[in-house]
Amino acid sequence: MADATNSVAPVFRPSPALSKVGPSAITRMTAATAELKRQGRQIASMHLGEPDFATPGNIVEAAIRAMRAGDTHYTALDGTPAVKSAVQEKFARENGIYFEDDQIVVTSGAKMVLFSAFFATLNPGDEVILPAPYWVSYSDIVEMMGARAVVLPTHAQDGFKLRAEDLERAITPNTRWLLINSPSNPSGAIYRRSDYEPILEVIERHPHVWLMVDDMYEHIIFQDEPFLTPAQLRPDLQGRILTINGVSKAYAMTGWRIGYAGGPAPLMKVIKAVLSQSTSCPCSIAQAAAAEALRGPQDSVRRYLGEYRARRDLVITELSHCPDLKVTEPDGTFYAFVDWRALFGKLTPRGETLSDDEHLCQYLLHDCGVSIVPGSAFGTPGFFRISFASSEAELRLGMARIREGCAALI
């Protein structure tokens, strides 16, 4: 028998790819909120970007029919013919973009399109340009590939949108992608024709740079102008554009985990190679539901939009009663991005100095009972994100607690 006193504890060595990556700020806030609720605390949850609506009945029924029909087996790697056809019809009908079968992929959530595209195209030393604020996962996924996230700050006075001259200066021989999210999580900014056109001119001048666009919040817009996406504006650049979307937000289908994308066939071929060795095909039942979402009645989408508009107006009105907080009214999504820099350095009732975003969010969570996400997680310190995907009652409670928390600072 081996001498227990001489045994060596096992050594765990994580991959170097994870050296800069950990659970996102949203994940950490979700866990902390859940723990406080488990302890009996009432927390106004405004950190999670998840619609509080149920998935529309026609979509649920489509999933039930699929199960009863025996559609419970593996599908084609990149999606069933039915869901791919529905995606093609959606792009043509709503965006004026036309894709062949080999230019479409359907995945287990839109994040998997992002991950697969970066995995398939990035090498160590490559660069991906990210206008900030950006969705929390973008930079981490880039870093996991050994590439470098080149963060370009945007500003409230520019509507939190990238300027073409800043993009031009940031491009190097190592630049591989520019990633734009419109409407933007977390700022709610929407790129219009006048915003996109000069950016696309820069892209045209640099053939080695490709454009990835995340249109996940396409149907949650509060402006009267129609939604536009780059491949629609510049068909001549479509060979370098990957257009990503999904059913999670518009149809309250976050748990169904279906994303999709259209792009150049050579790119989609290598994305499918990644999928073949990772997730394989998406859930067959969820694909049937997604096809119904894209093809079926859209009245629920319009109803949800009306609810989000009312909630946005409520949040903006409530924030106006907090003189030290500033917010640019979002044109889309269900988020408000709030500037709290006027509160830097103030003391909490416990005598602690508010020194950064994380400290502010922890104060509001533990002392005030409201959960939000620090702006530093989105590449923009000095801000925090509020999700108004929650009910009106939850929002009123949360906004009251934020006001009280800010008023209590010294």
Image: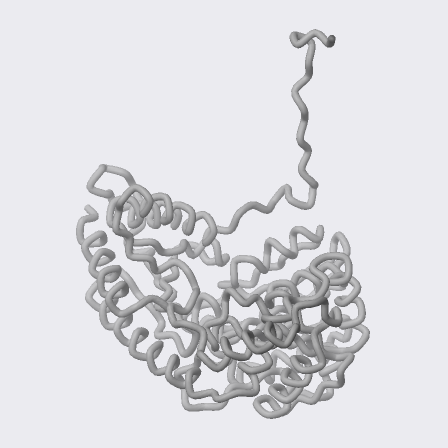
Residue at image point 22% right, 38% down: 350
The residue lying toward the viewer, choosing from 201 and 399, is 399
Q: Which quadrant: the N terminus?
A: top right
Name the image quarter holding residue 69. bottom right
Residue at image point 35% right, 76% down: 308
Residue 21 image offset from top left, x and y in percent: 59, 46
Residue 10 image offset from top left, x and y in percent: 67, 24
Name the image quarter holding residue 301. bottom left
Residue 232 image offset from top left, x and y in percent: 63, 88
Question: Is 140 located above or below residue 220 in the figure?
Answer: above
Residue at image point 51% right, 64% down: 255
Residue 140 in view of the camera: yes
Question: Is 206 located above or below residue 235 in the figure?
Answer: above
Question: In this image, 292 relative to 48: left or right?
Answer: right
Name the image quarter holding residue 176. bottom right
Name the colouring of the figure.
one colour
Q: How many marks?
A: 0
Residue 213 in view of the camera: no
Question: Is 10 located above or below residue 362 in the figure?
Answer: above
The residue lying toward the viewer, choosing from 96 and 296, is 296
Residue 381 image offset from top left, x and y in percent: 43, 54
Question: In this image, 193 relative to 300: left or right?
Answer: right
Question: Is 77 located above or below residue 299 in the figure?
Answer: above
Residue at image point 19% right, 46% down: 410
